[in-house]
Amino acid sequence: MTYVIAEPCVDLLDKACIEECPVDCIYEGGRMMYIHPDECVDCGACEPVCPVEAIYYEDDVPEQWGAYQKANAEFFDELGSPGGASKVGKVAKDAGPALTLPPQSHDE
């Protein structure tokens, strides 16, 4: 099991989750963050710091955002498991619904 980042993250890219992750498994894509399913240790440190509640335990992802489970895995199809986001930096790609979703507004 792993954690999943869903639609509320699209076009926000807050990065508080990255700072909290003890294993550096949260990668930055073009429009959202992605959790590497093989590198995540299920600690849950990222979930409470997300300002838009976009991070869910895999079994708890709301039905309307179910496609993001697959997207979080597909993001790493070509990238593989580099063993840490900090050495990779921002990856100029996205996966799943983030590819076609219209620009999201995050009013404060």
Image: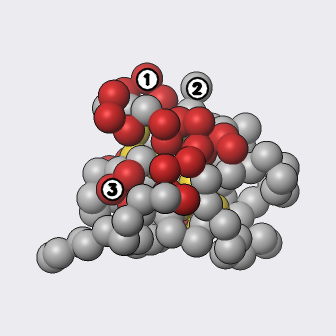
Residue 59's label in the rendered image is 1
52 sits to left or right of 107: right
Q: Amino acid at mark 2?
A: Met
Q: CA distance from mark 2 to mark 3?
A: 21 Å
Q: Is residue 59 visible?
A: yes
Q: How many marks?
A: 3
Residue 68's label in the rendered image is none
Are the residues flagged by discs 2 and 1 in contact, CB closer than 8 Å? yes
55 sits to left or right of 30: left
Circle 3 sits on which residue?
Answer: 8
Which residue is depicted at the point 33% across and 56% down? 8
Tell me, what colour scheme is on the image? secondary structure
Q: Position of residue 57 (x, y in %)?
A: 43, 33
Which residue is depicted at the point 15% across and 76% down? 108
Q: CA distance from mark 1 to mark 3?
A: 17 Å
Which residue is depicted at the point 28% across and 62% down? 51
Dot 3 alpha-carbon crowd within 10 angstroms: few under 14, some 14 to 19, many 20 or more? some
- Of pointers 2 and 1, the one earlier in the residue sequence: 2
- Of pointers 2 and 3, the one earlier in the residue sequence: 2
- Of pointers 1 and 3, the one earlier in the residue sequence: 3
Q: Is residue 19 above or below residue 40?
A: below
Q: Amino acid at mark 3?
A: Pro
Circle 2 sits on which residue?
Answer: 1
Q: Is residue 68 above or below residue 63?
A: below
Dot 1 alpha-carbon crowd within 10 angstroms: few under 14, some 14 to 19, many 20 or more? few
Which residue is depicted at the point 50% across and 64% down? 32
What kind of element bears circle 1?
helix
Q: Position of residue 64 (x, y in %)?
A: 32, 35
